[in-house]
Amino acid sequence: MFIIGLFLVGVGVYLKVTEAPSLSYPRDKWEFLWYKYTEDPQDPWGRYIKRTERTELSFAEDFLEGEVADTGESELIGFRASRTLRVSSRTRYEIELGSDDGIRLIIYDSDFEEVYRILSGWKDRSYTSYTYERTFEAGEYKILLEWYENSGEALFTFIMETIE
């Protein structure tokens, strides 16, 4: 009984340590939460791996067929990335999403009401990019970007630039 109790405590500690943090939507950077990808379109995020950050608004990464983001994984890997964007006056943006395999984007207002959604790239395929234009009124927007790699090359692109 004592050994079983120790085992259960150990499992509880392991689960607590590896529990994924909540997305925080920071104002000055992207927060990436990396997961093992489950291939289940309804619940794609399996085991939490780690957290990373990026300060630039736009980014691109090509891991070829190697390890992705120092996670120890090269396939069935993905992230949920969040950030808050402050728009001071009505601004038109061009948004480019590119990926091998899936990528999707959801943008919320400051009350987490959905204002924009791009799901067309959430599928297994070779690198493909999509370009969209969207006007944002002054305010704060919560951006959720999700990406997964099934197999083969692992790359993603997110570019968000103002249009004159």
Image: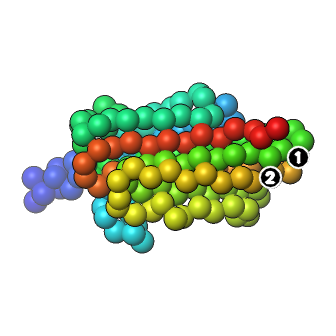
Going from N to C along the chain, the mark reached first, 2 or 1, is 1
| Residue lying farthest to the top in this orientation | 55
Pointer 2 with pointer 1, Cβ within 8 A: yes
Judge from the rendering whether residue 18 lies leftward or rightward of residue 20; answer left or right: left
Residue at image point 16% right, 52% down:
7
Residue 150 is left or right of residue 116, and the answer is left
The x and y percentages for residue 152 are 25, 48
Residue pointed to by mark 2: 135
| Vertical placement of residue 66 versus 19, above or below | above
Mark 1 lies on residue: 90
Callout 2: SS: strand
Give the image location of residue 148, x and y in percent. Answer: 38, 53
Amino acid type assigned to the residue bearing label 1 in the image: Arg
Q: Looking at the picture, how far across and down is residue 56, in whole percent?
A: 60, 29
Q: Which amino acid type is shown beneath numbered disc 2?
A: Thr
Tally of marks? 2
| Image vertical order of residue 8 relative to residue 54, above or below | below
Does residue 23 appear in this view?
no
Residue plotted at (42% across, 57% down): 102
The C terminus is located in which quarter? top right
